[in-house]
Image (cartoon, grey):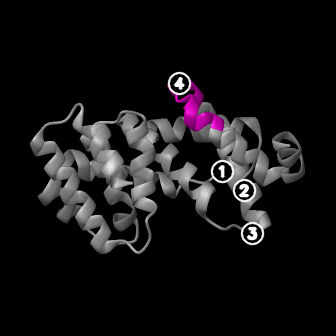
Amino acid sequence: MFDKIIDRLSESAGTEELNLVNEAYNLAKERSKSEHYLRVASIVSELNADSTMIIAALLHDAYAKEDITYDEINEKFGSNIANLVANLIKLRSIKLNDYNESSSVYLRKVLVGISDDVRVIIIKLADRLDEMQTKEYSEEEKKQIANETMNVLIPIAHRLGINSIKSELENLCLLFTKPDVYNDILE
């Protein structure tokens, strides 16, 4: 999977950037206990992301689990990447508590407002997509995740024009909320 990321990136990045991506990958592999970071980076790379976004995607999981610090990221990769990762983790703490339209609109505005950089939102969308594809949830958690995704993240993906992620998130939301309808459509 990492080879595909490097192949996509090598079309637009220089040797120094590729070396930093390799360094981030090795650090994430050493510190992370799952391959979530790699799957998120792969999703981001499919969007023709730059090396900065890919590095942030690779490091976000280790940072979230406190296996790497802001200062370490800042020292090795610079403040731009450290800030992307830190802002991405801030977004994790924001949850949709009720499902009315005004709450959804408010949360979308908060998410966009917190993110000084649209790249944070794009990595967040990739993060959610991977979590919904791979993580096990209880029935209640599935409904919560699906509602938050449908009401907040899918409209943001639509506005950003990231239809590949938008479509996949919509499919997963249908699977989470109405698995019988989802399976009927597949048939």
Give the residue type at disc 4.
Gly
Query: In front: mark 2 or mark 4?
Result: 4
Q: Tag on residue 151?
A: none
Residue visible at 32% across and 38% down?
A: 8
Amino acid type shown at disc 1: Leu
Mark 1 — residue? 96
Q: Which of marks 2 and 4 is nearer the N terminus?
A: 2
Q: Give yes or no for residue 12 being in the magenta stretch.
A: no
Dot 2, crowdedness within 10 Å: few (<14), some or many (≥20)? Answer: many
In front of the other: 98 or 149: 149
Give the magenta range.
157-167
Compared to residue 119, the image places residue 88 above or below, namely below
Residue 144 has which mark? 2
Q: Classify the position of the N terminus by image quarter.
A: bottom left
Where is residue 60? Give x, y as percent.
36, 58
**Amino acid type of disc 2?**
Gln
The amino acid pointed to by label 3 is Ser
- Please tell me whether residue 80 is drawn above or below residue 118 in the rendered image: below
